Image: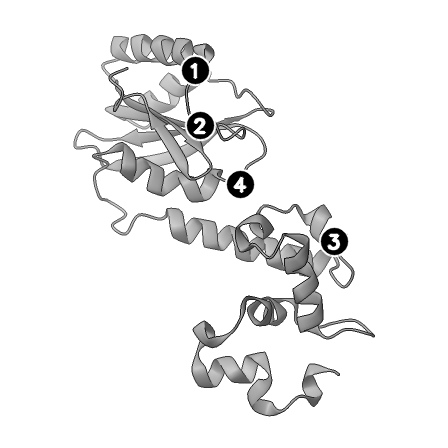
């Protein structure tokens, strides 16, 4: 039965307007974004199939590519793009500091910023946080994308960007898709090279944080 033929107080949009978004199930919220079903299925039926494709996990669902979403019956390019945009907004909300100009004082603060961005990635990315003299964020920027096991940390690019932004300190953040947060020998070597190069420009490398799922490893916390 089409959702339009349901009782008014059972329709997702009407239910949300009366009781708020928190009163809706995951499938009902997705149905609002999906908007329309197919000839044989309502939007909620399609939403349930979308969730089933991700093992009924919103976290896994957020990691599905647009191509994968489009392979689900009832989800075309427009609907897949809408869902992907919603997931990206959710990531940005989670990674946005409560106080945009707050100082970064701990590795835990770094993890709060980057776990939402990196935990579902299937490839490595390397980011740099640029900080002023009191460790407030000037900018954060992705500097490289790698494969399953390695993203290049180009010391010259990092230092140039730090100088251009008048940064006094930097923090390196990258992820391990394998789920193992511990640094490889290459991670250690690149960190030492970057630390020494930054010191020559009077820039401090405060930390190198590795994100692995919901866990993280901090070179600073470990005295490295």
- Disc 2 marks which residue? 174
- In the rendered image, the quadrant that contains the C terminus is top left
Task: State the image coordinates of residue 46 (x, y, percent, origin top left).
Answer: 71, 67
Q: Are marks 1 and 2 in contact (CB under 8 Å)?
A: yes
Whichever of labels 3 and 2 marks the residue nearer the N terminus, that label is: 3
Q: Secondary structure at mark 1?
A: helix
Whichever of labels 1 and 4 marks the residue nearer the N terminus, that label is: 4
Q: CA distance from mark 1 to mark 2?
A: 10 Å
Q: Secondary structure at mark 3?
A: helix
Whichever of labels 2 and 4 marks the residue nearer the N terminus, that label is: 4
Mark 2, mark 4: which one is toward the viewer? Answer: 4
Near-viewer residue (212 or 191): 212
**Residue at (63% x, 70% y) in the render:** 31
| Residue lying at the far left of the rendered structure | 134
Q: CA distance from mark 1 to mark 4?
A: 20 Å
Whichever of labels 1 and 2 marks the residue nearer the N terminus, that label is: 2
Q: Dot 4, crowdedness within 10 Å: few (<14), some or many (≥20)? A: many
**The disc label shown at residue 120, or none:** 4
**Residue at (38% x, 46% y) in the render:** 95
Q: CA distance from mark 3 to mark 2?
A: 29 Å
Whichever of labels 1 and 3 marks the residue nearer the N terminus, that label is: 3
- Disc 3 marks which residue? 70
Q: As displayed, is residue 6 above or below residue 132?
A: below
**Residue at (53% x, 30% y) in the render:** 177
**Residue at (60% x, 83% y) in the render:** 11
């Amino acid at each position: 039965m089409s959702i339009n033929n349901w009782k008014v107080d059972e329709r997702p949009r009407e239910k949300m307007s009366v009781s708020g978004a928190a009163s809706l199930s995951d499938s009902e919220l997705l149905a609002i974004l999906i908007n329309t079903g197919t000839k044989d299925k309502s939007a909620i039926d399609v939403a349930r199939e979308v969730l089933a494709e991700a093992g009924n996990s919103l976290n896994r669902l957020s990691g599905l590519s647009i191509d994968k979403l489009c392979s689900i019956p009832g989800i075309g390019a427009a609907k897949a793009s809408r869902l992907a945009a919603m997931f990206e907004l959710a990531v940005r909300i989670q990674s946005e500091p409560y106080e945009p100009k707050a100082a970064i004082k701990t590795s835990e603060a770094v993890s709060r910023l980057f776990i939402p961005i990196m935990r579902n990635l299937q490839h490595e990315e390397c980011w740099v946080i640029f900080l002023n003299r009191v460790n407030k964020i000037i900018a954060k920027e992705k500097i490289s994308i790698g494969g399953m096991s390695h993203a290049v940390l180009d010391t010259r690019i990092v230092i140039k960007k730090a100088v251009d932004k008048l940064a006094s300190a930097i923090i390196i953040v990258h992820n391990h898709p394998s789920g193992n947060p511990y640094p490889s020998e290459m991670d250690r070597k690149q960190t030492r090279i970057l630390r020494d190069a930054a010191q020559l420009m009077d820039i401090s490398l405060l930390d190198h944080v590795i994100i692995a799922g919901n866990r993280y490893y901090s070179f600073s916390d470990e005295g490295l």
